[in-house]
Amino acid sequence: MSRALVICGPTASGKSQIALDVAQVLGGEIVNADSRQVYRGMGIGTGMPPPSAFERVPHHLYGFVNPERRYSAARYVHDADAAIAAITARDRLPIVVGGTGFYIEALLGTMPLDRPPGDEALRARLRREAQVHSREVLWEWLAAISPTRAKSTRPSDGYRILRALESSLMARTETDALSAQASRPRLESAVVVLRVHRAALTKRIAQRVAAMFAAGLVEEAQSIRAAARDAPALSGLGYAEALATVDGLATRAEALALTIRRTERYAKRQQTWFRRMSAVDIVEADEPEHALRTIIARAREKLAPA
């Protein structure tokens, strides 16, 4: 049985730096759980940890997928399981870090919508999910539950995704779900959700977006588009806005403002997801040093060997 510390929270909540500091104290290695940071050549736009962080602590599942490829939650679970097993074998602590709640819950076996409720309850739930989450997230749910249906459903077709999800979930029995979960290695985890108050998070998001553009986001987006114009990775925050400045569709100031607004909305969706998760510890992260001490104490308490 493997043990893992999971640190999650909205974008710009300080996850990467806090996880790095925790890893150094506890003898850990970091496993990415951000659906954009898996892509190669996208370090600026996805907020990937800098090379100096990789030198301090081993990092896994960062920048290893070509941008033109589509990466799914099912593949993430497979890759993360392998990384966690290897870290555990080295007698180190796996620290899973990211803001993609869907990936995290898939890894933990607590993924929403993995049980088939009644028809009307399911449809109502799917309508709510469609209001909160993007078509891409819903398609990834479908890919995890029914790869066959996902292959025949375009990720951009929201209506068909919802219908396919409904059919797949209705067909999936409780026994099937439990059996699928039982076939994976058991993971004992301590899950921490970072919480930053709205004013502070809004300020951090604005600073982060400005830093991304200053660091060369426009050039990074151009490079990816030149290699693969239809790369799924280009749907990430900031890339369309950056390319709009190249195409004469927006000024730099307009692109910055729009990226900030989109990132703020995304952070709200992340917070909604994490509030719904059960069996998590909420850690106030306005002060990183306080968050660091709290996380280390809880990890030692919950993940100490029996």
Image (spheres, helix red, strand yellow):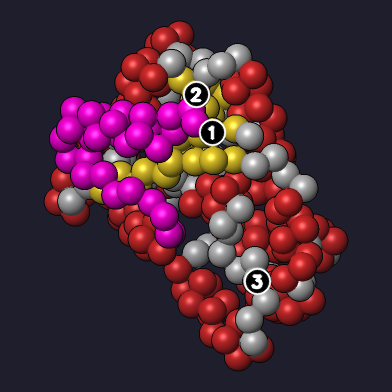
**Alpha carbon separation for disc pair 2 and 3:** 31 Å
Q: Secondary structure at mark 3?
A: loop
Going 43% across and 59% down the picture, which residue do you hit? 277
Going 18% across and 51% down the picture, which residue do you hit? 197
Please state which amino acid type lies under the numbered disc 1: Arg
Q: Are marks 1 and 2 in contact (CB under 8 Å)?
A: yes
The stretch of residues the image draws in magenta is 277-306
The residue labelled by disc 2 is 93
> Is residue 237 rendered magenta in the image?
no
Residue 302 left/right relative to 144: left
Q: What is the x, y in percent for residue 14?
A: 30, 35
Q: Residues within 10 Å of mark 1 (few under 14, many from 20)?
A: many
Q: What is the x, y in percent for residue 28?
A: 46, 20
Is residue 24 shown above or below 80?
A: above
Place residue 188 in its image quadrant: top right
The residue labelled by disc 3 is 115
